[in-house]
Amino acid sequence: MEIKINKNIYNKESVKKTIQAYTSLAKIDFLEEADFFIVKIDNINEEVKEIIQDEFCNYLLFESGKCL
Amino acid sequence: MQTIIVDTKIYSLRAIFSTAYVFLDNYYIFLEGFDDDKIQIKIKSKKENEDLEKIIDEFKNELINASLRLKISEENKKIREIIVTSALYGRVEAPRINDPKGICKTWEESHSEVKINDPKGICKTWEETHSGKSVHMAVNNEILKEKDSDYCKMFDHDGDKN
């Protein structure tokens, strides 16, 4: 599972914080491209996969909002 | 899932984040870039089979609310800072107002420079008059002054009044 995060909207610090918060639930890799941050979430229970992805995005939004 | 496209020339990114924050409890929200100046907001309900049309409208209204709040907050920033500074330090460096007649001054401010003609020092407090002297010395001096006064001398001749 991969999440593409726009660099113009979300900042790197909040992405890192979100990854840190979710590392206990899954294996998370972080990559940086020109316009996007790529977050790869693996080793995760299929039943909760979608929920974790959505919750990850919500947490990211919350963290980014704090940084503005 | 529903999507809204918002122009960042009209609504700031900060306003969009503030609005999204209000809906985080019940909805999943993800922001994506759309065009150069536009953001696509994806909204998904945490509950199943929920009609999102109403929420989209509420989101748009909240977006206007947030934008207005931010604008007012920006306009009042200076006043807020003055109030906080005054609360923390107890006084404020007052803004310079063109007030040649001193209408804006308090009574204390306008009368602080008034000099009262008081050659005998009647308006002075006891401490101001006797500063530097001990209490006993000061009291003795007062008694001596009284003894030297004409009124006391009237009784000094054989204890009789003339």
Image (spheres, coloured by chain):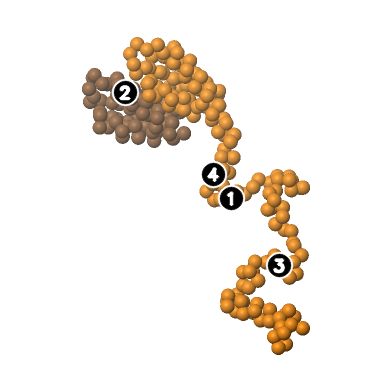
Chain colours: A brown, B orange
* Gap between marks 4 and 3 measured at Cα: 42 Å
Of mark 4 and mark 3, the one earlier in the sequence is 4
Chain containing the residue with disc 3: B
Tell which of B37 and B55 is nearer to you: B55
Residues flagged by tags 3 and 2 on a common chain? no
Element type where label 3 sits in the image = loop
Given this view, does label 3 or label 2 mark the residue nearer the observer?
3
**Spatial distance from mark 4 to mark 2, Cα to Cα?**
42 Å
Closer to the observer: label 1 or label 3? Answer: 3
- Are discs 1 and 3 both within one chain? yes
Subunit bearing disc 1: B
Dot 3 crowding, Cα within 10 Å, few <14, some 14–19, many 20+ = few
- From the image, tell me which residue sits under label 3: B122
| Residue count near mark 2 (Cα–Cα under 10 Å), binned few <14, some 14–19, many ≥20 | some
Q: Amino acid at mark 2?
A: Gln
Q: Earlier in the sequence, mark 1 or mark 4?
A: 4
Q: Which one is in front in this view, the residue at disc 4 or the one at disc 3?
A: 3
Dot 2 falls on a residue whose secondary structure is helix
Q: Residue at x 60, y 79 (%)?
A: B137
Give the numbered dot on residue A53.
2
Q: Report the disc number at residue B91.
A: 1
In the displayed structure image, the side of residue A44 where residue B99 appears, left or right: right
Looking at numbered disc 1 in the image, what kind of residue is underneath it? Arg
Measure the alpha-carbon separation of dots 1 and 2.
Answer: 52 Å
